[in-house]
Image (cartoon, coloured by chain):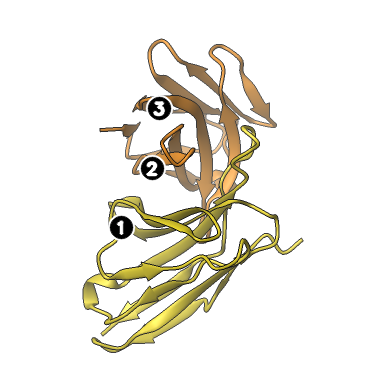
Chain colours: A orange, B yellow
Amino acid sequence: EDKVVQSPLSLVVHEGDTVTLNCSYEVTNFRSLLWYKQEKKAPTFLFMLTSSGIEKKSGRLSSILDKKELFSILNITATQTGDSAVYLCAGVTNSNSGYALNFGKGTSLLVTP
Amino acid sequence: NAGVTQTPKFQVLKTGQSMTLQCAQDMNHEYMSWYRQDPGMGLRLIHYSVGAGITDQGEVPNGYNVSRSTTEDFPLRLLSAAPSQTSVYFCASTLLRRASSPLHFGNGTRLTVT
């Protein structure tokens, strides 16, 4: 059974800290790994990772995938209170339907002033 | 740029009532899906569709029906609402034929069943 596990489940940091969120996955027929940020509404897309070792970067956020170890991390540097959210990781596979997606339970990040 | 549109945003039902949550997308996405999100449970797939006329069950399909008569619309029906269906529901879609297309979410429907 495909599985996506995120850690930690929750995290509290001070503004300016750097955080690393973890996502491990066990999925068959891997297609991609997705990261989303969810505040009090719909998840918003952050990154899609398909290849090992290639860092995706957007401002203070970056992410990388290790396909051998079935692992991805999301880094946030110089955190701000606006980074407070739940961060979701999802493993995407090629299934009989052509697409299947498994979400982890998320990491809840709180950045305090 | 409408993207994925869900209606209503909020709904309160009594046990046993029926209703339909609407979802429409204007991006010509083949794949559409419904998730429910509950505290501590993450996003769980209810039903999905890979094209008009094709639907399939996800992880938690019981109590829900779907149909896909057009590419744009994917309504979710609750035939007889139960308190266990109190949740936030998200519709999401993607372009299957483009590997770089992520899943796009609607803004959600918060449903309370009393």
- Residue drawn at x 55%, y 59% as measured from the top left: B52
* Residue A113 visible at all: no
Subunit of label 3? A
Observer-nearest residue: B72 or A106?
Answer: B72
Q: Quadrant of the N terminus of chain A?
A: top left
Element marked by disc 3: strand
Q: Are circles 2 and 1 on residues that touch, CB within 8 Å? A: no
Element marked by disc 1: loop
Amino acid, disc 3: Asn
Spatial CA distance of label 1 from label 3 is 20 Å
Observer-nearest residue: A50 or A59?
Answer: A50
Is residue B58 placed above or below B53 in the rendered structure?
above
Q: Is residue B75 left or right of residue B28?
A: left
Q: Is residue A102 left or right of residue A63?
A: left
Spatial CA distance of label 2 from label 1 is 11 Å
Spatial CA distance of label 3 from label 2 is 10 Å
Q: Is residue A45 left or right of residue B67?
A: right
Mark 3 highlights which residue? A22
- Residue drawn at x 56%, y 46% as measured from the top left: B103
Structural crowding at the residue carrying mark 1, measured as other residues with C-alpha within 10 Å and reported as few (<14), some (14–19) or many (≥20): few
Mark 1 highlights which residue? B39
- Same chain check for tags 2 and 1: no
Q: Are circles 3 and 2 on residues that touch, CB within 8 Å? A: no
User: Which residue is most to the front?
Assistant: B53
Amino acid, disc 2: Gly
Q: Are circles 1 and 3 on residues that touch, CB within 8 Å? A: no
Q: What label sits on residue A106 in the rendered view?
A: 2
The quarter of the picture where residue A23 lies is top left
- Residue drawn at x 28%, y 52% as measured from the top left: B40
